[in-house]
Image (spheres, rainbow, N blue to C red):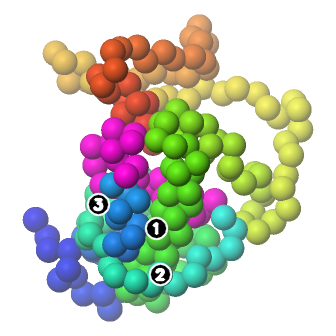
Amino acid sequence: MTNVDTIDLTAPFALDAVSKGGFRGSAEADAISDRLRETLGLDHHFIPARLALARSLSIAASPPPATGEAGRAISGEQLFGSGADLATWVSLIIEHAGRAPQDLAEFRSWVRAHWVRGMAALGTLLEQAAGDPLRFWQLIAETLPERSGALGGEAVVPAKDALVAKAVSVRIGEDARTREPVVWRVNAKGSAPHCALMGASGTGKTTSAIHLLH
């Protein structure tokens, strides 16, 4: 396993360097992350980190440089995934900045700034939810910024006839015998756009739903 703290930060910027590089938020962000994991039943450190990045990226203004004690290190592969997932996250962060980073060090500073800002916003929502995970997700939905055509642009309201449901493929697991992926085709012909996760308290309904969504 690569030591994420020994990567050459001055190397030319590339997806491979991002995947192997180490990323950190702040100690304060990690404390909020731990509360999120406990409240929402999340197994991994990277899940609240991704939520924080997404929350910050939804804000058009650039995040202020992160300050304070650095948090726990996590590899780029864990934080962003690999392949198309990695490329998508990197593209979103660069698009938000409005230019390509000079090197991995600058990109890492952008990630840290988004991570810290986003986690602070999630911490506020967590306090408002008073420990209720369902209320937390409701607040997430209620406080999303208006959809815009471009970062910092005016909100765009799609035409009524443009709001047509399209089929979306969601991987929900794999066949225990064949190891083939099991895909749920949301809104596909002959299928309904609804899903129910049922089980006793503590059996993993919330965690399963989060994995389906991300």
- Amino acid carrying mark 3 in the image: Glu
Which amino acid type corresponds to the residue marked 1 in the rendered image?
A: Trp
Calculate the distance from the C-alpha at mark 3 to the C-alpha at mark 1. 16 Å
- Quarter of image, res 206: top left
Closer to the chain start, of discs 1 and 2, is 2
Q: Can you give x and y, in whole percent of width and height, for residue 144 in the image?
A: 68, 50
State the count of labels: 3
Q: Nearer the viewer, residue 144 or 9?
A: 144
Label 3 vs label 1, nearer the camera? 1
Q: Does the magenta stretch include residue 82?
A: no
How far from the left and from the top, in percent, is residue 182? 34, 22
Residue found 61% across the figure and 71% down from its top: 96
Q: Name the residue under label 2.
A: 66
- Residue at position x 33%, y 15% from top? 200
For residue 115, the mark is: 1
Give the residue pinned by disc 3. Answer: 77
Q: In the image, what residue type sits under mark 2?
A: Ala
Q: Residue 12's x, y, as percent?
A: 35, 86
Decide: marks 1, 2 in contact (CB < 8 A)?
yes
